[in-house]
Image (cartoon, rainbow, N blue to C red):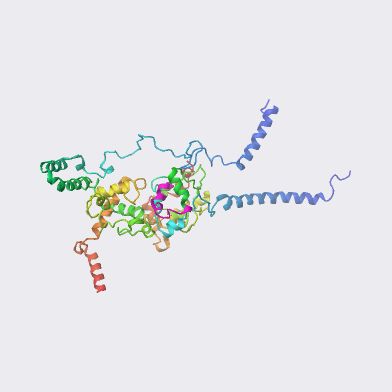
């Protein structure tokens, strides 16, 4: 007795053969699998998104510690209130002096609380990275020279202050007049992270280390506008001298 | 004994045998023609989107870098679609009254995603990773075409397996220096001819055997 003796198995075998032959023409089952592809719509979740928000308390692999200096624009002075307390005490000792002291307190709180140090050593590679990132995310408004005449500004966006010639708007609002050239690096980091005024935040577009690299490059832009000809390599110096000769 | 078949059946049988052969060849040919046509591959066909976003304007005219919006292209398999927040970076002030952009503002107000039509659809049995192609020196334009000239985005190439293999068999011609990967206009013709060989070595591009191995893409 062979396997094909019964009616059922023979018909079944024929159906299977036909089915196998015909099936490739019908559907691409392996091409369209039930797994979600990135950002594919979902009918399961009420908001229609297959990409789910992180649950509170989720720790990503390789996540930077909240205590890391990479994370914060603030310097160590912030946790050290001694100078502020001293000034306030002076104010109490000499009530008329309070008026003159308060702006100083504010200044210390505002300017001094930002870190003036980079959380890592700034190398040429960091500056190159900063330049690359600046050219992606910042030039659109701040333009390559840092004067704030980027293409989006030309199209009508609020003009940002020049890194080189203008005062910080953030500090101006707190009554402090300080050139962006002189503000601590932590301030730039904070504005990139949280935005300020018309500038949106870039925390989701620019990762932590890149934000610091961009700050380093902004410092380089600022320095470049006040570099002394004498400090340049001889070749560069000659190029400038030749250009000046030519313009005379 | 009378003949069962009339004499004319000689011709009919010959014609029918020949036509079955021709039909089979024709059907096979038609399958290939239709299967490789834009009707199936969707190449060169612009999609209607909820908002008529123009890469020609944003990339070609304004010169915004690809990575401003597609932020994860260097670090992950998926290039990343910008959240509405990225649109609003500029459009909170630029064209903020435009009715064309109302779906963007509505999405931002209601915290609901814009349902963009996906342009590039690889079958799910294909493994593809953007970041490795970027780091090995394959430019955006090599696969996506002149996106800076597309008023509405479309798929430039067929994305058929043969098209992938064209490059995997001979990647040398398609490599560019890291600084030119995101450029839409860079051309190899102005570069020294040994550039391809140099980049093959510098970027540690694997041999053809590995690049064309089944499990490189079907894993």
Image location (x, y in percent) of residue A224: 25, 59
Furthest residue toward left? A93
Residue B136 can be seen, yes or no: no
Res. A209 visible in picture: yes
**Figure disc tally:** 0
Q: Check if residue A205 falls in the magenta segment.
A: no
State which region is magenta.
B79-100
Front position in the image: A86 or B4: A86
Q: Identify whether B218 is placed above or below A149.
A: above
Question: Is residue B13 left or right of A145 when viewed as pictured?
Answer: right
Q: Position of residue A122 (x, y in %)?
A: 25, 50
Q: Residue furthest bottom?
A: A248
Residue A137 in percent (x, y) is at 35, 52
Quadrant where the N terminus of chain B is found in the figure: top right
Does A187 sit left or right of B34 as displayed? left
Q: Looking at this view, is A172 or A185 the one in front?
A: A172
Left-right relation of A71 to B80:
left
Q: Is residue A227 positioned above or below A5 on the image? A: below
Q: Does the magenta portion include B84?
A: yes
- As drawn, the residue found furthest toward the front would be A96
User: Which of these two is toward me, A93 or B37?
Assistant: A93
- Residue at left offset 22%, top offset 61%: A227
Q: Position of residue A175 (x, y in %)?
A: 23, 50
The outermost residue toward the right is B1
Residue placed most toward the observer, B141 or B21: B141
């Amino acid at each position: 007795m062979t396997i094909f003796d019964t009616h059922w198995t023979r018909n079944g075998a024929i159906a299977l053969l036909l089915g196998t032959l015909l099936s490739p023409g019908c559907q691409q089952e392996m091409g369209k699998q039930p797994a979600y592809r990135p950002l594919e719509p979902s009918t399961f979740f009420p908001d229609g998104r297959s990409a789910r928000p992180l649950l509170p308390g989720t720790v990503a692999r390789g996540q930077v510690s909240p205590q890391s200096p990479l994370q914060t624009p603030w310097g160590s002075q912030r946790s050290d209130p001694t100078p502020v307390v001293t000034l306030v005490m002076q104010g109490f000792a000499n009530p008329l002096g309070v008026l003159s002291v308060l702006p100083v307190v504010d200044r210390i709180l505002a300017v001094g609380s930002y870190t003036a140090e980079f959380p890592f050593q700034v190398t040429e590679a960091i500056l190159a990275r900063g330049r690359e990132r600046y050219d992606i995310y910042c030039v659109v408004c701040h333009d390559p020279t840092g004067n704030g005449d980027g293409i989006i500004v030309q199209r009508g966006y609020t003009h940002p202050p020049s890194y080189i010639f203008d005062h910080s708007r953030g500090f101006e609002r707190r009554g402090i007049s300080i050139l962006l050239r002189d503000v601590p690096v932590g301030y730039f980091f904070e504005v990139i992270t949280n935005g300020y005024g018309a500038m949106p935040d870039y925390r989701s577009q620019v990762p932590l280390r890149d934000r610091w690299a961009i700050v380093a490059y902004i410092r380089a832009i600022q320095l470049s506008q006040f570099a002394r000809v004498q400090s340049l390599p001889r070749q560069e110096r000659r190029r400038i001298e030749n250009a000046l000769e030519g313009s005379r | 004994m009378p003949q069962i078949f009339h004499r004319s059946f000689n011709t009919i049988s010959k014609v029918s045998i020949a036509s079955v052969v021709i039909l089979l060849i024709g059907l096979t040919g038609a399958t290939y023609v239709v299967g490789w046509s834009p009707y199936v591959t969707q190449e060169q066909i612009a999609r209607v989107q909820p908002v008529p976003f123009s890469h020609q304007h944003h990339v070609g005219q304004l010169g915004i870098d690809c990575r401003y919006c597609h932020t994860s292209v260097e670090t992950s398999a998926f290039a990343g679609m910008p959240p509405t927040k990225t649109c609003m970076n500029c459009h909170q002030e630029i064209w903020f009254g435009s009715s064309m952009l109302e779906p963007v503002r509505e999405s931002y107000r209601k915290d609901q995603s814009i349902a963009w039509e996906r342009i590039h659809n690889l079958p799910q049995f294909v493994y593809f990773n953007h970041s490795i192609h970027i780091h090995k020196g394959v430019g955006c334009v090599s696969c996506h075409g002149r996106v800076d000239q597309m008023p509405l985005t479309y798929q430039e190439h067929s994305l058929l397996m043969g098209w992938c293999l064209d490059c995997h068999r001979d990647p040398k011609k398609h490599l560019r220096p890291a600084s030119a990967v995101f450029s839409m206009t860079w051309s190899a013709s102005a570069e020294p001819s040994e550039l391809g060989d140099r980049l093959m070595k510098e970027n540690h591009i694997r041999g053809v055997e590995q690049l064309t191995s089944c499990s490189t893409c079907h894993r």
